[in-house]
Image (cartoon, rainbow, N blue to C red):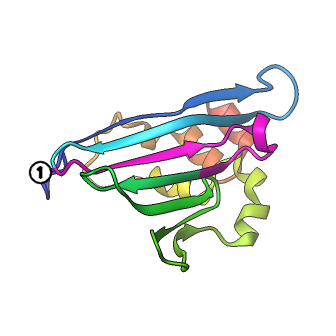
Amino acid sequence: RVRHTNEHYSWMKPATTIHNIILGSLWNDQEGTVTISNHTTGEKASIFFTPYKITKHYTKLKGEVYDKDGNVTIEIKGDWSSHYKYRFVGSEEWTDVWSLPREILDDNKRYYGFSPFALQLNEVQENIAPTDSRHRADQRRLEHGKVDEAAEEK
């Protein structure tokens, strides 16, 4: 439940495949449909993560938001590692929800594959337990692109 609105949500996540665990550059692929249901209002969203084997681009997504009667009200498209946008059905104009600057995307490997969006999700906040994984020194070093130091710490 969402505290402020008392709405109840549930969702199913896509399948995640990790490639090149033993040899080569490590990368992951999200594949399948995420369905997010609002049990309070009856609305739902369906987001399809296009598998690499179809597009040869492993981060594409597209989706739709449905009202309680099952009518599509919003279309979603993007790339889960760099940007996504939406538009209301019948509109020609797409609205950016978030996107990363090109220079950040180009420097992604320095941060061990963490996108700035992922790094923001892991920021240390006030009043978290001392055992919270966000306090791990090795994790902090990885986020700052210090891979060798992180390996030593771990």
Quadrant of the frame with the N terminus: top left
Label 1 SS? loop
Assess disc 1: are there few (<14), some (14-19) or many (≥20) residues with their C-alpha within 10 Å of its C-alpha: few
- Is 126 drawn above or below residue 131 in the view shown? below
Q: Quadrant of residue 77?
A: bottom right
Q: Amino acid at mark 1?
A: Asn
Residue at the image point whose x is 24% and y is 52% from the top: 68
User: Would residue 77 appear left or right of 135 to someone viewing this image?
Assistant: right
Q: Which residues are magenta?
A: 41-61
Residue located beneath label 1 in the image: 6
- Is 126 drawn above or below residue 27 in the view shown? below
Residue 103, how many percent across, how many down? Answer: 75, 71
Residue at the image point whose x is 73% and y is 43% from the top: 58
Q: Is residue 12 visible?
A: yes
- Is 75 drawn above or below residue 48 in the view shown? below
Q: Quadrant of residue 73?
A: bottom left
- Given the current orientation, which residue lies at the most extreme right position? 24
Magenta-colored stretch includes residue 48:
yes
Q: Is residue 123 visible?
A: no
Q: Is 57 in front, or is 142?
A: 57
Residue 102, how many percent across, how many down? Answer: 74, 71
Q: Is 91 in front, or is 3?
A: 91
